[in-house]
Amino acid sequence: MGKFIINGQKPLGGQIRVGGAKNAALKIIPASLLSEQAITIDNLPDIEDTKRCLEIVEALGGTASYREGQCQIETKTLATTRIPADLANKLRASIMFVGPILARTGQVSFPHPGGCVIGAGTRPIDLFLEGFQALGAKINFANGYYELTAKKLTGAEYFFTTVSVTGTEALMMTATLANGRTTLKNCAMEPEIVALADYLNNQGAKIEGAGTPIITIDGVDKINGGAFTVIPDRIETGTFAMLAAASQSELLITDCCPEHIEILLNIFRKQGVNFEQGENWLKMLPSKKIEAYSIKTHEYPGFPTDLQSPYTVLMTQAHGSSIIHETIYDRRLLFTDMLTQMGANIIMCDPHRVVVNGPTPLHGRKLTSPDLRAGIAMVMAALIAQGKTEIDNIYQIERGYENIAERLKLIGADIERVE
């Protein structure tokens, strides 16, 4: 198991490139199963989660080749419709394969998806199952596997009782090959959903409304193969921006889309964080004083839950008190105990809210990454802390951030990856 050793408070600066969006890549790979034709994916991040997704494609009988950010996938024939447990248990996003396989073949079996502590096996998949049932699937559970069957899926109306990004994408993909019209209501509106819908429409789907609360899908007989370029990762963009702000660094963030983190940039303006922006770049500049500002996570275009952890680190360096209110995931604030061990002044009010008082100096510690987003927040805290920090369980970090140690070295970080 690898770990990071970080010596903090080294001057940071220069230029860092944003990679392809993890949350877009993990949906376009399963979407390839909707077509018997090949798909080429550009700007695919080389991270652990995409590797697991490609392994699932190959386990199902497809072929996948990856080289220097580009991937070719072909699933002309499928050897099985059963998603293997050893891969599904590592990856919450394995649930995204269910709809495309069901829509194309009329059957699929899979275990409860796994992942990190945030996406582990106790997290329900009821929205997915209800949606598949609405489209006509029959569901059976036996020997640890869900078994779904449908002679032919039929369009339906489905209302999401909880706004769900993956739920919206899963049913949108599934409905593309169903008979008739499907109307999805109370949908998530993330940029990754729009990108996925645009690709499917280019390959023959009939989807309207992606990026709004109501999406309609008129089923078609087939989806063609084609080419897809993964959009920039808005979570990486926001994380790098907050690292620069917390460390008072001048940092040019390239190949990004500032429009996708508009709420964070608006908060920066209120806090006195200095930055400049263009269509595909963001330049962070040192700030005289950063004011504390309370946030409440919300579905897009609200404050992303995936940016809550690094934002909490930023607030340890801001002047005043801020309340961090996590509304999406129950266990996502537990990592703040590690920040307290580093010297942060954080009071936990309840499992959903903490009060951060700043600014406080942070000190190096031995830490363990509990999940993907808390893990990168630990890296960020270590970079601004005094002394040495060791972070174990970095597999969770490398699930979502490509070659992160080497990229941070290029902007001046003293970070080593060791086994």
Image (cartoon, rainbow, N blue to C red):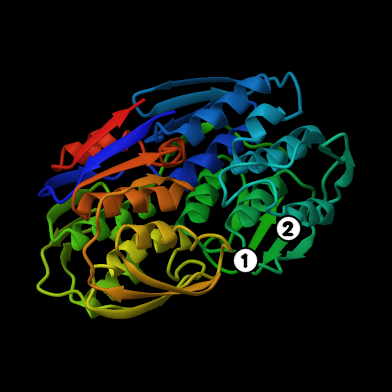
55 lies above or below 374 = above
Which one is in front, 25 or 13?
13
**Rendered residue at 43%/52% (across/down):** 373
CA gap, disc 2 to disc 1? 10 Å
In which image quadrant can residue 92 be found?
top right
Q: Which residue is mark 2?
A: 127
Q: Quadrant of the C terminus?
A: top left
29 lies above or below 164 = above
Give x and y (percent) for residue 348.
47, 72
Q: Is residue 353 visible?
A: yes
Give x and y (percent) for residue 360.
23, 68
Circle 1: element type:
loop
Q: Quadrant of the N terminus?
A: top left
Circle 2: element type:
helix
Which one is in front, 257 or 312?
312
**Rendered residue at 25%/72% (across/down):** 268
Give x and y (percent) for residue 22.
45, 44
How busy is the neighbourhood of tag 2: few (under 14 within 10 Å), some, or many (20 plus)?
many
Query: Does 320 sit left or right of 87 as displayed?
Result: left
Q: Which residue is mark 1?
A: 163
Query: Does 231 sit left or right of 299 as displayed?
Result: left
Look at the numbered discs 2 and 1 and tell me whether their residues touch, using CB distance below 8 Å: no
User: Amino acid type of disc 1?
Assistant: Val
Query: Does 181 sit left or right of 200 as displayed?
Result: right
In which image quadrant can residue 352 be found?
bottom right
Query: Does 138 sit left or right of 284 as displayed?
Result: right
How busy is the neighbourhood of tag 1: few (under 14 within 10 Å), some, or many (20 plus)?
many
Q: Answer with mark 2 or mark 1, whichever residue precedes in sequence.
A: 2
**Rendered residue at 71%/27% (across/down):** 84
Give x and y (percent) for residue 411.
15, 43
